Amino acid sequence: MPALPSFVPYLIHTLFPPWVRRPTEIGAEVMMVAGGAFIVYWLLKYKKLQWLWNEWLTTVDHKKIGIMYLVAAIIMLARGGLDALMLRTNLALPTAHFIGASEYNEVFTTHGTIMVFFMGMPLIFALFNVVVPLQIGSRDVAFPRLNAISFWLFAFAAALFNLSFVVGGSPNAGWTAYPPLTELAFNHTVGENYYFISLLMTGIGTTITGINFLVTILRMRAPGMTLMKMPLFTWATLNTSALILFAFPPFTIALLESLLDRLAATSFFTLSHGGMPMMYVNLFWLFGHPEVYILVLPAFGVFSEVVATFSRKKLFGYPSMVLSMTAIMVLAYGTWVHHFFTMGAGPAVNVFFGLSTMLIAIPTGVKVFNWILTMWGGRVQFTTPMLYFLAMIPTFVIGGATGVMLGAVPADYQFHNSYFVIAHFHEVLIGGTVFGLLAGVYYWWPKMFGYKLNDRQGKWAFWLFAGGFWPTFIPQYWLGLEGMTRRMYTYPLGMGWHTLNVISTIGGFIMGAGFLVLAANVLYSRRHQEKDLTGDAWDGRTLEWSIPSPAPEYNFAVIPTVDERDWWWQEKERRRQGEKPVVVKPEEIRPIAIPKNTPVPILLGAAFFMGAFGLVFSWWDIALAGLVAVFSILIYSWFQYDHYRILSAGEVRESEELLGRLGA
Amino acid sequence: MRTWAKRVALALGLVAVMAGCGGPHAVVLNPAGPVGRIELNLMDVAAVAMAAVILFVLVLATLAVVRFRDRKGNKAPYTPNVEGHKVLEVLWFIIPALILTIIGIPTVQDTYALAKVPAKHPLVIDVTSLDWKWLFEYPGQKVATVNQLVMPAGQPVLFKITSDAPMNTFWIPQLGGMEYAMPGRVLPLWLESYKPGAYWGHSGQFSGREFEKMFFSVKAVTPTAFSAWAANLRKTAPAMTVADYHRLLQFTTVGHLSYSSYPAFTFPSVTHGFTLKGGMYLLMHNNPVHD
Ligand code: HEM
Ligand SMILES: [Cu+2]
Ligand SMILES: [Cu+2]
C-alpha cells in the first residue's frame, strides 16, 4: 500500500476525476449528502432506527418487499425522468449545449438503463409481490428469504449504478453497451464497469425472482384453483417468470464476458485478439427482445384485471387471453434478429425474423380486441386506473402497428437507429408498460396501504402524463422520417428538425409535471384519504379483495376453496342471494407458520456491494473481501435452522376478531 | 400577468412559424433512387394496412366506451356474465393474420430483391468508419476522400462497408436504408441515385463522444463528371501515407479531405485483413456479395 501522502491524492483522483466535478454532478452530490443527512436526522430524532430495521430492512414478508420495490421504483423513475428532461432540453434547439457531448452520452445511457432495469423491473416485481400471493390464496411466496435476497441485490445494484454519477464516472455506451465501444481501448473510465457489474448483480436477483414466482404459482395456489381458473395477472406473472428464466442467462453471459474483457484482458468480444463483437449483439438481443415482453406482459395482466373490474363484467375470452399471452411468451424468444436486420445476416435470416416479428403482433392484437369487448355490454367507470387503460389503447396500438412496420425488413433498413424506433418503443413502453403499471399501482394501492390514492389528483396527474405523452413522442416518428438518428447530443441548423424537437421537449416537461402531481398525490393521500374498512375498495372480482386492506401478515386466516374464475365476485353474488355468507369460521382457524425476519438478505446485498465496488475500480483486495463476506454470510445462514415462528390459532383468531371478520 | 400572456402568445406563434418548414425535410419520404423507392413503397403498404387496423380498433373502443359508460339511465344492455364469443375470438386471430400477409409477401420479395446488386460489374466504393469520420476509397479510381462521398448517378454503386473503430451504420436516407460498419467484417450495400444531386449521410449507430459529427456529404454526378473528378484528384490531391492513415485513426473530427492514392492495407480484402486500429494481421470474413 502506498504511503499516505501519495495515497490520498490517488484516491481523490480515482474517485473524483474531473468528469464527476461538473455542475450537475456536484449538484447531485450535494443533494445526495443532504438527503442522506436528513434521513439519518429524521430516523434519530423520531427514534425510528429500530422500527426501520425490524419492520422493513430485515423483513421477508412479500407485501412489505413489494412496497420497498415500489418505493425504489418511484425514486428511480424520478432519476430516469430527470435524465430524460436533460436530454430533451439539450435537443430542444439545434446546436444547443445545455450539457456537452460527454455528459449527454452518459445521461442517455443512464436514462435507458435505469428505466429498464431499475424502474421497470422493480415496478413489476412490486406488483408481483403485493398481488400474486394474495390472488392465489397463498401465505407468502415459495422462498420468502430468497425473495428478500432478490430485493436487496436489486437495491444495492441500483445504489451502485447511481453512485457512478458522482464517483468515478457514469457509463456512456448506451443501454445496449455494444462492444467495441465498451472495450478499454475506447472507454477507459470505470463507467462501463459500473454498468456490467450492477446489471450482473441485479440480474442474479431477477433470475431468482423468476424462479420464485414460477414455483409459487405452480405449487401454492388455493385448493380448487386450477391453472385455467387463475386470475389474468397471475397468468401474466407466470409467463413473465418463464421469460425471465430463459432470457437472463444469455444476458448474464454477455455481461460477464464483457466485464472479463475489460478487467481480465480476455477477448470474447475484443476484436484485436480475435473476439467477435457481433456475438455480443446476438446474446444481448436474445435477452433484449424477451426483456421488452417481460416488461409488458405484467401490464397486460393489470389491464385484464382493471378492465373487468371497472366494466363490472367478466373478462371477454379468458381462454384466448391465456392462449395469446402464452403464445407471446414462446414467440418472444424467436424475434431477436429484428434489432439488427442491417448487420448483414442475409435475406433468408432477415425474412425469417421479419415474419416471426409480424406473427407476434397477432396474439397482441387478440388481447386488445378482447379488452375492448370486455367493455361491450358492461358499465364502464372512469376511475384513474381505468383512464390509464383507456389511454393505453391508442398509444399501444399505434406503437404495435409501427412495430409491425419495423418488422417489414427493407422498411426497417430506413427506420433502424432513427427516431422512428425511439418513438416506437416509447409508445409501447410508456403507453403499454408504464401506463399499465401506474394503473396497477392506483388499483392495488388500497390493498397495500388501506386507503385509495386521491382520485381527483390522480386524474390531474393522468391528464398531464398521458396528455404530455403525445406531443413528446408522435413528432419523433416524423423526425425519424427526416433522417434524425438516435443518440445525437445535438444537431446542425438547417436540417429542419428544430420544430418537432421543440414540441417534443415541451411534451416531456408536461409529462414531468404529471410525475410531480403523482408524487404530490402520494404525499397528500397518506394524510387525507379515508380508510377503506371493507378490504374491497373497488368492488373487485378476485381473491385479494376478499381479505382486509392492508392484508394481515398471514394473509388468509383460512384459505378458501376456489373453484371458479372471479371467485370473489361470485361469492358476493351468492351472498346477495342469501346463500352462504363469507366469513371466517373461528373453528377452522389453525396455527400458522410465519417466516421469521432475517438480516441475511440485506447483509448479503451489502457484501455484494462491497465486492462489486472493489471490482469497479479493480481494487482486488476489496473485491476479495466482498467475496469472503458473501460466503461467510451464506455459511452463517446455512447453519440457521429456525426459519419460522408459529402464530397460534388463538392469536390469529384475535387478529381476525379485531378486523371484524369472525362471523357467527 | 400581461407580459406573461404576451410571451406565451409569442412562443406559440414562433412554434407555428417553424412548423411551416417540416415537410420538405422528410428525406425518407422523398427517395432519390430505386432502393429508397422500394423501401418507401413497402412502408406505404405497411402504413396503410396498419392505419386500417388502428382505425378499426379506435372506432370500436370509442363505441364501447361511449355506449357502455356507467351512467344513470343508460339503456344499453348490461350483460355482466358474457364470457366470450367463439367466432369473434377465432376471427381475432384470422383477420390480423390476413392483414399481416398483405405486408409479409412484399416484405419477402423486397428483402430478396435488395440483396442482389442489379449490375454485373457495379462501381465499388470501400467505406470505412473511423473515430469520428468516414473514409471513402475508390478502388477503381485509386483515390480516397474523407467525409465527402462522390458517386456516379444513374447506375448502382456497391458499397463495401467496414469499420476501423467502434460500430457505426452507413446511412444516406434519401438514397436508401442503412448497413452496419463493423470492425472485422465487410458488409455490402448497393444504392443508386437516379439523377445527379446532393444529399447527406449520417451514422445511425452511436460510436462515442463525437458521434454527432459523423455527417458526410454525398454528391451524385454524371459518370463522365465522376471520371473527370477522379482524374483531377489524382493530379492535384496529396497521396495518403501510412502515417496519414494512422492520423485518421485518432480520436478526432476533421472536415473534408481528398487523396490521390491510398495504402492497400487500409481496406480488408478476402485474403488479407486487419484488426481494430489497423494493428494485426487477421483473416476476415468477407460477406459474399450477390453479383
Ligand atoms: C406488436 C408488437 C411489436 C413489434 C412487431 C415490434 C417490433 C420491433 C422491431 C422490429 C424493433 C427493431 C427496430 C430497429 O431497431 O430497427 C423494435 C424495437 C424495440 N421494441 Fe418493439 N415491437 C413490438 C412491441 C414491443 C413492445 C411490447 C415493447 C416493450 C414494451 C417493445 C420495445 C422495443 C424496444 C425497447 C425496442 C428498441 C430497443 C433499442 O434499440 O434500444 N416493442 N420493435
Ligand atoms: Cu426514454
Ligand atoms: Cu424486439
Image (spheres, grey):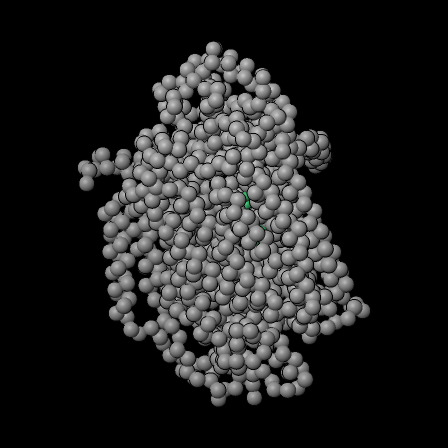
Location of residue B57 by image quarter? bottom right
Pinpoint residue A9: horizontal percent, then vertical percent. 27, 34
Q: Is residue B186 left or right of residue A519?
A: left
Who is closer to the viewer here, A558 or B103?
A: B103
* Relative side of A549 to A368, left or right: left
Q: Quadrant of the C terminus of chain A?
A: bottom right
Q: Can residue B113 be seen in the rendering of this structure?
A: yes
Q: Position of residue A644 (x, y in %)?
A: 35, 75
Reply above or below: A195 against A607: above
Position of residue A274 measured from the top left corner of the image (x, y, whole percent): 33, 39
The image quadrant that residue A606 belongs to is bottom left
- Report the front residue among A599 and B257: B257
Screen quadrant of the N terminus of chain A = top left
Q: Which of B12/A297 is in front?
A: A297
The residue positioned 39% from the left and 62% from the top of the image is A208
Q: Residue furthest front?
A: B120
Check the image and report above or below for A555 versus B20. below
The answer to whether B60 appears left or right of A270 in the picture is right
